Amino acid sequence: MQAMIFAAGLGTRLKPITDTMPKAMVRVGEKPLIEHTIERLKNAGCNHMVVNVHHFAPQIIDFLHKKDFGIEVQISDESAQLLDTGGGIKRALPFFDLQKPVLIHNVDIFSNVDLRYFYLSASSTDEIDALLLVSNRHTKRYLIFNDDMLLAGWINVETGEVKSPFQELKTFVAQQAEETKINFAKAGYRLCAFSGIHILKSSALMALEIFPERFSIIDFYLRNIEKLRLKGFLKTDLELIDVGKHETLQCAEAWLKKSLTP
């Protein structure tokens, strides 16, 4: 298994902590977030990882050079410019075997996802180009999938903004804009929240190469809906903590204690 950890973010929601350190080095329990994430991926069978860095990059690089994880951990340096999620993956392509899937994982996520099973689910079929782990979590922005769980679009339910190449979907939303809750199920669609965990296979990885240096991976997916088979992997019992803000740091501590309890 090969994976990429997004660790380049500015961590603005964790200020003032991130005024002196990168988010990846914020400690939960006895370890920084980056160590938790690497160990979790290693335990899932990952033997090659790439970590992108930008904000206080030397701190992460120094930590990874001093810590022996027993696997290959390489650095994709974005110190000169933060490249966003899609651009970050594109910059890291030379580090990967592009014939094998790459699992993408945010550094600030704790979850109950079986990463080995998730990776094998993508690896064991030729019928998809990318697999996005999603849930029924309530949020403002959703990915829209059809009945086959293939990506159809994106929506901000607060503003009503829709992004999709399918005019019938956009028309459907526009026609029901006056409703308090649009009945997507009636039209053969479902809304799911993206988890920040996904897998790109060879075809999707190579499709990144024609994109500019800096771009969002969600924009990449939305622009390739009709070219690539982008499937949602719905985990109905997903438990996920985004440790990117102060109020969830304590939740992460409790999560860690629970996971270590026999």
Image (cartoon, rainbow, N blue to C red):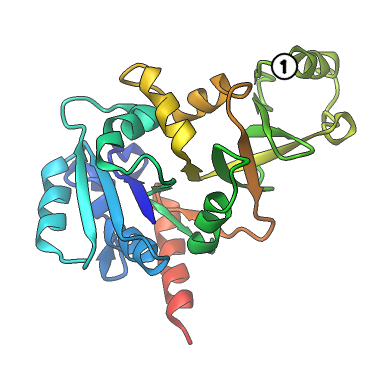
In this image, 171 relative to 12: left or right? Answer: right
Q: Is residue 45 above or below residue 182?
A: below
Q: Quadrant of the N terminus?
A: bottom left
In this image, 258 relative to 187: left or right? Answer: left
Tell which residue pokes out farthest to the bottom in this image. Answer: 262
The residue lying toward the viewer, choosing from 100 and 173, is 100
Q: Quadrant of residue 75?
A: top left
Label 1 environment density (alpha carbons within 10 Å; few <14, some 14–19, many ≥20):
few
Residue located 69% across and 20% down the image: 160
Q: Is residue 237 above or below residue 177?
A: below
Q: Quadrant of residue 252?
A: bottom left
Residue 122 appears anywhere in the view: yes
Helix, strand or loop under label 1: loop
Residue 218's spot in the image, x, y percent? 51, 29
Residue 42's spot in the image, x, y percent? 34, 65
In this image, 160 relative to 45: left or right? Answer: right
Residue located 56% across and 43% down the image: 131
Tell which residue pokes out farthest to the right in this image. Answer: 186
Q: According to the image, label 1 marks what residue?
A: 166
Residue located 32% across and 37% down the image: 12
The residue lying toward the viewer, choosing from 112 and 74, is 74
Residue 240's spot in the image, x, y percent? 53, 56
- Count of marks, rendered view: 1
Q: Amino acid at mark 1?
A: Phe
Residue 107 appears anywhere in the view: no
The residue lying toward the viewer, choosing from 179 and 113, is 113
Residue 46's spot in the image, x, y percent? 36, 60
